[in-house]
Image: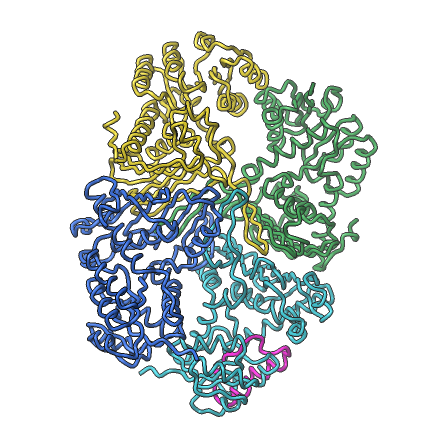
Chain colours: A blue, B cyan, C green, D yellow
Amino acid sequence: MSAKINVGIIGTGRIGRLHAEHLAFRIPEARVIAVADVQLEEAERCAAELNISTAVRDHRVIMENPDIEAVIICSSTDTHSQLIEEAAGAGKHIFCEKPIDFDLARIDEALEKVKKYGVKLQVGFNRRFDPNFRRTWELIHEGKIGKPHILRITSRDPEPPPVDYIKVSGGIFLDMTIHDFDMARYLIGSEVEEVYTVAGVMVDPAIGRAGDLDTVVVTLKFKNGVVGTIDNSRKAVYGYDQRVEVFGSGGMIGVSNNKPNTVRLSTSDSIKEDLPFFFFMERYIDSYIAEMKEFIRCVAEDESPSVTGNDGRLAVVIGKAASLSYAENRPVKLFEIL
Amino acid sequence: MSAKINVGIIGTGRIGRLHAEHLAFRIPEARVIAVADVQLEEAERCAAELNISTAVRDHRVIMENPDIEAVIICSSTDTHSQLIEEAAGAGKHIFCEKPIDFDLARIDEALEKVKKYGVKLQVGFNRRFDPNFRRTWELIHEGKIGKPHILRITSRDPEPPPVDYIKVSGGIFLDMTIHDFDMARYLIGSEVEEVYTVAGVMVDPAIGRAGDLDTVVVTLKFKNGVVGTIDNSRKAVYGYDQRVEVFGSGGMIGVSNNKPNTVRLSTSDSIKEDLPFFFFMERYIDSYIAEMKEFIRCVAEDESPSVTGNDGRLAVVIGKAASLSYAENRPVKLFEIL
Amino acid sequence: MSAKINVGIIGTGRIGRLHAEHLAFRIPEARVIAVADVQLEEAERCAAELNISTAVRDHRVIMENPDIEAVIICSSTDTHSQLIEEAAGAGKHIFCEKPIDFDLARIDEALEKVKKYGVKLQVGFNRRFDPNFRRTWELIHEGKIGKPHILRITSRDPEPPPVDYIKVSGGIFLDMTIHDFDMARYLIGSEVEEVYTVAGVMVDPAIGRAGDLDTVVVTLKFKNGVVGTIDNSRKAVYGYDQRVEVFGSGGMIGVSNNKPNTVRLSTSDSIKEDLPFFFFMERYIDSYIAEMKEFIRCVAEDESPSVTGNDGRLAVVIGKAASLSYAENRPVKLFEIL
Amino acid sequence: MSAKINVGIIGTGRIGRLHAEHLAFRIPEARVIAVADVQLEEAERCAAELNISTAVRDHRVIMENPDIEAVIICSSTDTHSQLIEEAAGAGKHIFCEKPIDFDLARIDEALEKVKKYGVKLQVGFNRRFDPNFRRTWELIHEGKIGKPHILRITSRDPEPPPVDYIKVSGGIFLDMTIHDFDMARYLIGSEVEEVYTVAGVMVDPAIGRAGDLDTVVVTLKFKNGVVGTIDNSRKAVYGYDQRVEVFGSGGMIGVSNNKPNTVRLSTSDSIKEDLPFFFFMERYIDSYIAEMKEFIRCVAEDESPSVTGNDGRLAVVIGKAASLSYAENRPVKLFEIL
């Protein structure tokens, strides 16, 4: 018989609520039996809507529930490493949203615990599960473009988050570019060795006053010789811009944006198409389902998740190097951070 | 309080199972409380998987259940008009898959019952709810292309159904082109007056031996002067081909196919993209959810469904005219059929 | 030594001027030594600009010049068959703009003379030499789409010609659709057997008052079983619309419009592209050069032109059948015209 | 009366021959009356084919011909600055291929002479005249994307030149990237302040042995705050890759490659398009004509060319900075070079 995996979710904000819904309705192999949120009414509403039996304020109720095999950590970043340690100590498998922590030492401690207690840990780099990027990865690994030479990632948000969020976000490199650092490592299959950053505050001076940047271009050198660039903006007025290009000795792969429809309107003035999907909840919905399916499958079949704690750690390392590069206007090697 | 609409589903084959899943997991305003299928084990499996309490062989259990407000008719076409009449007599609102019947007199009787008992009836022309075609409709109705002049619909399946199915399908015009006839009426907003058909058996001689065609081009004249063409093939080797173009005095709208990813691979040989979605279950999944949401909303809010019994009837009329046109190789006016 | 082919041009209106320029500057194998036009100052201006030594009013000066091996007939349609006969009688090879004549008997007489005197005749179906349509032809003939089943041609002008022109144009089928009839025969490589026309006056009532149509859809049945449609409009506000699609047992070829640039502009409102090339002088410029190169090459190397007098004749036959079909609202077989 | 501008061409290799043909056949306002090449037979062949009266080995024949108003310098780079000085001294207007010189002091001397003698000088950055990039410039200057933030240029050749050429090419930055440096300045309308280069030898080790690079990514910081990247490869197996993207506060402009046809072939395997134009002679033919028209127009109407000697100089400065950046693996400010 195939028993369902019992899951507890910690944090029922936007992303926690999303994972809860997917686990409840789209992944028959899982059963959410408890949700926790420091704002209890959030947890309760989520539980009511999704027919989940238990909603609590204190996440320890989940940690102590012996029926729960796996926890989904969707609380604020400053709680991630602590919750990972608790869950590992309780013998529960862990899915944790990115980033693991802003502090490398705390990440290392948490990963140490995960290792010590032998639980599984998957980090929420959902874009690896997106059909476009997954197909790109496949084509690269089938050798369709030969040996990669140049990588280009464009990743632009439709609008900046509130400045209050930016202040606690860890900065653009750990909040936004971190997804692209992971994508770069995922697609190229080699480690980043050195980064160089140019950047500015072009979208909103308030972001600068909060100590952050809103427009960045990061150049990457990989161990295998590949060179790449990532460009980010906090505000693309035409919507969420999520593209990748990998150029190699045998060809090139280009990924363009996903659109809500394929309609083209030709008038006396121009040919028009509708804008791409507005933001990540619309654009990446399939990848959120796929990453959670993968996590549940790994738990059920006792396999290792493909997005590891080390992946979570290295994206933070690159982010810190990119930040230092900007501060000192020089290329920074990753071993300076490690 | 917003009570859920209790629904019974009759027929749990491929399309019935799909509607059941959507009603169970994607449409919180509905609750499926019973499923029926002449193959009981099908109904039972569906009920088990989707947590539905009742599974029966005899659909009358559903008709007689006073808790059920609405029925979803997904059984074979030859049962549709009878089931509509029973459901209407039982005071239940009705969603019925297309076509209503192959016989116009039977359709008329069924619609008469629907009218008499004052229940709602929505016919399953799901493509009207597809984002591409809905957007096309919107742009036309916003006047973006002025007055329509020419309509072109391309609708090709990736592979023909089994010949055994073809024998009971009612023929390509009532089985396949019927969707395009409805799309034509929906987009142009005027009635078809005359049709002319050229066609052949090009895909598989067995289809011809079964008395059917596999490749057809139907020309349409509308009351408002618009002229249009529909082309169908039972076998497009590159996958499900679902395109529309509307040309008017002020511009043109073109709809291209939906794709599973946006990847383009450039090699020394060519630039390649993956094929479109394979068939209707992949391509039109969103429209199936949307049509069912609309039906449930109409029941809940006591509104009239936008896809009416008359829409279901007229698509059959056009199909019969197209068939007669082919048989006699002449343009056929719809009043010859009506 | 490779002597140049001496050419005379009859008619220096828009299209004659264009051929003259190509022969003078783009086709080193040819030399234009005389131009004639009933409006002498037109001929003189053309000669002056292109460094052509002789400009005359009377085309017989060209016919009688023993140095001239080939004539390019670009005068008004009502003179074509007469000029072909004269040129053939004078032993000159002939390039003639379409249509050869509106009268089939006159076409037959002219072609008879061409045959009798053994001169070459190429008819100006320039679109066969367009890179898009040539590539389509190649792919079909390489078997890339298997056996063709369905053909679709869209051919729409950006604006109608003056009504005074329409009155002498021979009607839309012989003036505009004629190019599409030839394209259909060229791509499918089989003869049209039967046509059916639906049409209307939707662009400008003045066109209707002049006895012509401005919007037509012609259905074609070919001897080899292929079915096809052509749609025309005299006014596509978004510019010259020249597309073709051929669907077959092994795939599909689609041709989209040529654009003046590849720029895409994304704003908060939509994604925009510039319109396609405005009209045939911009869109088909390469094909005009290529057809003339081919004609000169055939003369120089004593080969038969690929676009024959019979091609010119058959396009007229189909046009007459399409016109009759509209008049009588019934499918018309070509043998009714022949 | 509008007299023609008499032109002499120095250097009748590939690019000189191209300009000669354009001036002879496509630009009626010009007349080529002499060509010179150190390989006399090259000059003679060019003259014979294009009907040019004089072909000489010694360019001084052109410099001393008082009938010649303008010279086109297409000889090898090491002769450019000397020829500019001679032509200026002879009072002739100058079109010079890029780069002006590899040595900044020599460029300065040459530009000084141009200034002293008051002749016009246009440098051969033909891509500014390409319809795609010109349209991009227009849209930026019409404010369609607001204030530019990020620039991305991709420029990849289909195959590397012979290693013997590479040895005298001045290196990839002055031979290939120089076009992109100019494009960056042209589109952004601000000066580059600092560059940073990552690069490698990935295409062919022989290029590395010749002391050059074949794959480079250059990051640019502009005075107005814009950040940008240029990526180059000497070998894109899918053909000449010439794209640009400009992202700004109000939108984005993207330029994709030009293609020889618009055909799309769908088979059971994939959807395929033909590769882009192979290389610059096919891709940029229109821009070569347009830049030469502009030069002749400036001479005829006594206007200043839009691509100046200073433009030619600054592209070399940026190239030297990019080279130094690579050598020292650090960002380099342009004033270090100036």
Depth order, front residue of B218/D201: D201
Residue C62 image-quadrant placement: top right
Does residue A275 show up magenta in the picture? no
Residue B81 image-quadrant placement: bottom right
Q: Tell me, yes or no, if residue C269 can be seen here.
A: no
How many numbered callouts? 0
Image-based side of D254 in relation to D238, left or right: left
Image-based side of A34 in relation to D9, left or right: left
Image-based side of D213 in relation to B282, left or right: left
Q: Position of residue A16 (x, y in %)?
A: 29, 69
Tell me the residue at 41%/22% (across/down). D168
Does residue B101 show up magenta in the picture? yes
Depth order, front residue of B159/D55: B159
Q: Position of residue A41 (x, y in %)?
A: 22, 76
Residue situated furthest front in the rendering: A116
Residues in magenta, as a range: B83-112
Q: Tell me, yes or no, if residue A214 can be seen here.
A: yes
Q: Compared with residue D106, is residue D215 higher up or lower down, i.e. above or below?
A: below
Q: Quadrant of the N terminus of chain B?
A: bottom left
Q: Quadrant of the C terminus of chain B?
A: bottom right
Depth order, front residue of A265/A331: A331
